[in-house]
Amino acid sequence: MSNDALGKTLLALARASIAHHFGAPMPEAVATPEYIRMQQPGACFVTLTKQGRLRGCIGTLEAWRALQDDVRENALAAAFRDPRFPPLSATELAETRVEVSLLSSPQPMTFSCESDALAQLQPGLDGIVLEHAGHRATFLPQVWEQLPEPVQFMAHLKQKAGLPAEFWSDNIRLSRYRVEKWKEA
């Protein structure tokens, strides 16, 4: 199975799931190598953009359900339940682009202090999960395009988690993951 074929299948499924919400029929599943892979557990994020600007992004960090179900649910959540945006309208769908990011399993990082953690980050490659005392946030590796400096990246991630940008604690936990991503043209 090629990654390009899997990507095309995931993008088509995400778009079809949103269109189905507006009354379009869901295409029938065909037993292909991609279909078989989509029956296995997988974690993904679905990102929607409109005219190059974020329009919704929801995902799963841990693989706990079939990849096809994760894509469907995250596509619907990105389109209709991202609290940062109003629900997508049927008229917006044609001008909305879909991106699917397939996540690897997050791996805990070991570090002695914030500067040690920052030195370990690999801009453009690492997706990061930050956790502290009930606060949790993640940035996909794509966020490095807007926040290319590790200090800036981490400060915004802390703010996304509801913590001050300058906050640090020895109890912060960081995990990293990688993604394979596909985006509609």
Image (cartoon, rainbow, N blue to C red):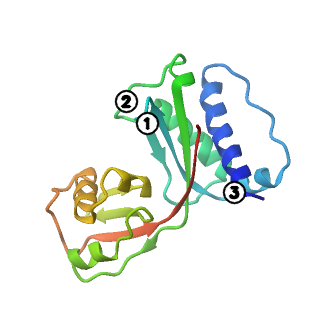
Q: Between marks 3 and 1, how big is the CA–CA gap?
A: 24 Å
183 shown above or below 172: above
Quadrant position of the N terminus in the picture: bottom right
- Find residue 62 and report its horizontal and vertical position in percent: 52, 60
Q: Which mark is residue 85?
A: 2
- Find residue 146 and report its horizontal and vertical position in percent: 33, 50
Q: Between marks 1 and 2, how big is the CA–CA gap?
A: 7 Å
The answer to whether residue 112 is left or right of residue 101 is left
Q: Sequence-wise, which precedes: disc 3 or disc 1?
A: 3
Q: Are marks 3 and 1 in contact (CB under 8 Å)?
A: no
The type of residue carrying mark 2 is Phe
Q: Sequence-wise, which precedes: disc 3 or disc 2?
A: 3
The type of residue carrying mark 1 is Gly
Q: Nearer the viewer, mark 3 or mark 2?
A: 3
Mark 2 burial class by Cα count in 10 Å: few <14, some 14-19, many 20+: some
The answer to whether residue 68 is left or right of residue 134 is right
Q: Which mark is residue 11?
A: none
Give the labeled residue for mark 3.
Answer: 3
Report the residue at 21% width, 76% height from top.
115
The answer to whether residue 57 is left or right of residue 115 is right
Q: Nearer the viewer, mark 3 or mark 1?
A: 3
Q: Which mark is residue 56?
A: 1
Q: Are marks 1 and 2 in contact (CB under 8 Å)?
A: yes
Q: Sequence-wise, which precedes: disc 1 or disc 2?
A: 1
- Find residue 30 and report its horizontal and vertical position in percent: 84, 43
Name the residue nearer the viewer: 116 or 18.
116
Q: Between marks 3 and 2, how big is the CA–CA gap?
A: 31 Å
The type of residue carrying mark 3 is Asn
Q: Label 2's element?
A: loop
Q: Label 3's element?
A: helix
28 shown above or below 20: below
